[in-house]
Image: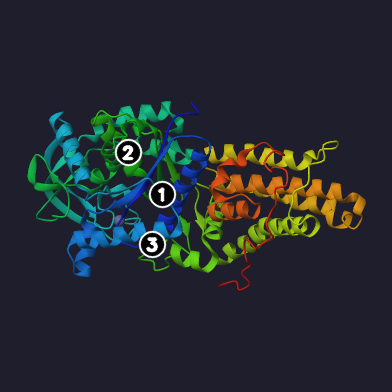
């Protein structure tokens, strides 16, 4: 069980906006999970990419006065360069305009059509161009799209339909039998509620007369396929392309709650029709709020990851996002709160501990570690960090990143208290007590070493700098998981302290 490979995916991002906080958060979560599970010896593959077909993209390209593909090239490139600049890692970046993806979508469409689950019919419905989907009357709020607050357009046309309703009961039964298929639980309940009403069939084509920017249906060249049918298949087409289909049922899809229905209803029924097993888990996060409403380009309050990195350092930004949001719930983004976390938890908690310990190590022993006290070992710190490790592992498995960091920083609080209680700076005034001072500092260096290891998935740059200050080359970070008291060979020296997190004095409005 614990050796199963893991496949993490972010949603494909529409190339109608530059990377903002929502994109950044979910890509960060993928980066954290990959680092975390790799450090525990698991095989991991991560996928991200861009969704490049559909009305919205055609409109954005037209507004910019360029061809859709040229527009998609530019914005897709912006995502890749941004993730590189902020240090997010992923194994593969897919674009829905990639030839292998187009071929894969066409083959799945042909297959489902041949099985009789795609039929031709006429349709008259309420269409929201922003959402790129038809709405049922009861889904509207006061007659408008709940996301875009616009009256949907009445569209009547002949189209192809996916027989989604044929899989409704099987989906409901699967969701009952597999409670962990959609997490957190509230979203599973939301989907079960949706499935109590008839879900109907899904219109999966758009006439080229209305929209030409899409993947042509293999069985009718007058139509392109619906953008969701195209985009959702990326999770499988990428593996097929990479020759890694053995990872398929191991998929953990990371998504925002605004795209729950396509992922929890369209996607599993498409998989069923295509004869593929369902993903392992749908992991649904809430929205970042700013003042009021969901953050989006149209609202105008965009948080750009590169601005945040320049202003506070990427690790402080990562820490804030992971510590502030309970995965699944909404959270409010505030730079003031970010600065408080930076000055409090990071500078005063972790940064201050590292500075004090490394400074004393220099002052009393020229950086060279002294033995742990063999006759009276200090169990307090060792126990606190062992507990932090256990809690952190359990919380990350549950996607409770805020709790994982809380557990680690509780252990760091213990370490800061341990400095005050043992008072090595007072003991050091008596030369006879120096062996005890050396033992205390050794315990504290162990605490910092374990911190570097545990914090790496969340704050990779900090982990690497901390490892360096402790006298380990960065490449040896993976070896920092050695048992307490065995990591520092005889004569090992730490380096003089450097501030890990410079305090930010100006709190922005
Ligand atoms: Zn809408």
Say which of marks 2 and 1 sits in front: 1
Q: Earlier in the sequence, mark 2 or mark 1?
A: 1
Residue 296 — which label?
Answer: 3
Residue 265 — which label?
Answer: 2
Q: Residues within 10 Å of mark 3 (few under 14, many from 20)?
A: some
Q: Position of residue 440 (x, y in %)?
A: 80, 47
Res 63 → quadrant = bottom left
Q: Earlier in the sequence, mark 2 or mark 3?
A: 2
Q: Is 139 located above or below residue 184 in the figure?
A: below
* Coloration of the structure image: rainbow
Q: Nearer the viewer, residue 125 or 104?
A: 104
Spatial CA distance of label 1 from label 3 is: 13 Å
Would residue 189 appear left or right of 367 to someone viewing this image? left
Would residue 349 appear left or right of 338 to someone viewing this image? right
Q: Earlier in the sequence, mark 1 or mark 3?
A: 1
SS of the residue at dot 3? loop
Residue under label 1: 256
Residue at 37% over, 28% down: 174
Q: Is 213 located above or below residue 388 in the figure?
A: below
């Amino acid at each position: 069980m614990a050796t199963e490979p893991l496949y993490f995916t972010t949603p494909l991002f529409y190339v109608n906006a530059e990377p903002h906080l929502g994109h950044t958060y979910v890509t960060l979560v993928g980066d954290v999970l990959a680092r975390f599970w790799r450090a525990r010896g698991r095989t991991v593959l991560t996928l991200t990419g861009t969704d490049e077909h559909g009305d919205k993209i055609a409109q954005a390209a037209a507004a910019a006065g360029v061809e859709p593909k040229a527009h998609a090239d530019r914005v897709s490139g912006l995502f890749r360069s941004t993730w590189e600049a902020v240090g997010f890692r992923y194994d593969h970046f897919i674009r829905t305009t990639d030839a292998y993806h187009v071929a894969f979508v066409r083959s799945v469409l042909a297959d489902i059509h041949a099985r009789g689950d795609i039929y031709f019919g006429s349709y008259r419905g309420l269409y929201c161009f922003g959402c790129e989907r038809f709405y049922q009357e009861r889904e509207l709020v006061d007659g408008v799209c709940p996301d875009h607050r616009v009256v949907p357009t009445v569209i009547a046309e002949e189209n192809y339909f996916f027989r989604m309703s044929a899989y409704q009961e099987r989906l409901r039964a699967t969701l009952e039998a597999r409670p962990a298929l959609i997490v957190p639980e509230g979203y599973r309940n939301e989907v079960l509620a949706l499935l109590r009403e008839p879900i109907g069939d899904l219109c999966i084509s758009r006439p080229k007369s209305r929209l030409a920017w899409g993947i042509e249906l293999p069985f009718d060249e007058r139509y392109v396929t619906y953008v969701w049918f195209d985009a959702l298949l990326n999770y499988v087409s990428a593996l097929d392309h990479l020759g890694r289909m053995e990872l398929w049922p191991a998929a953990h899809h990371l998504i925002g709650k605004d795209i729950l229905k396509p992922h929890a209803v369209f996607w599993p029924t498409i998989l069923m029709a295509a004869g593929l097993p369902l993903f392992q888990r749908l992991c649904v996060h809430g929205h970042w709020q700013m003042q009021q409403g969901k953050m989006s380009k149209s609202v105008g309050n965009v948080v750009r990851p590169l601005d945040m990195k320049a202003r506070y350092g990427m690790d402080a930004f990562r820490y804030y996002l992971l510590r502030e949001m309970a995965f699944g719930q909404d959270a409010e983004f505030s730079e003031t709160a970010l600065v408080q976390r930076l000055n409090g938890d990071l500078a005063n908690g972790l940064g201050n501990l590292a500075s004090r310990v490394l400074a004393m190590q220099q002052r009393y022993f020229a950086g060279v570690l002294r033995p742990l006290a063999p006759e009276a070992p200090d169990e307090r710190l060792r126990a606190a960090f062992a507990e932090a490790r256990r809690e952190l592992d359990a919380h990350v498995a549950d996607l409770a990143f805020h709790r994982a960091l809380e557990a680690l920083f509780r252990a760091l609080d213990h370490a800061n208290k341990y400095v005050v209680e043992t008072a090595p700076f007072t003991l050091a005034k008596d030369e006879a007590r120096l062996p005890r001072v050396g033992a205390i500092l050794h315990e504290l260096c162990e605490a910092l070493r374990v911190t570097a290891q545990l914090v790496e998935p969340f704050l990779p740059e900090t982990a690497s700098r901390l490892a360096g200050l402790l006298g380990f080359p960065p490449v040896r970070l993976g070896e920092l998981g050695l048992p307490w008291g065995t990591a520092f060979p005889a004569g090992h020296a730490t380096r003089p302290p450097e501030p890990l997190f410079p305090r930010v004095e100006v709190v922005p409005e």
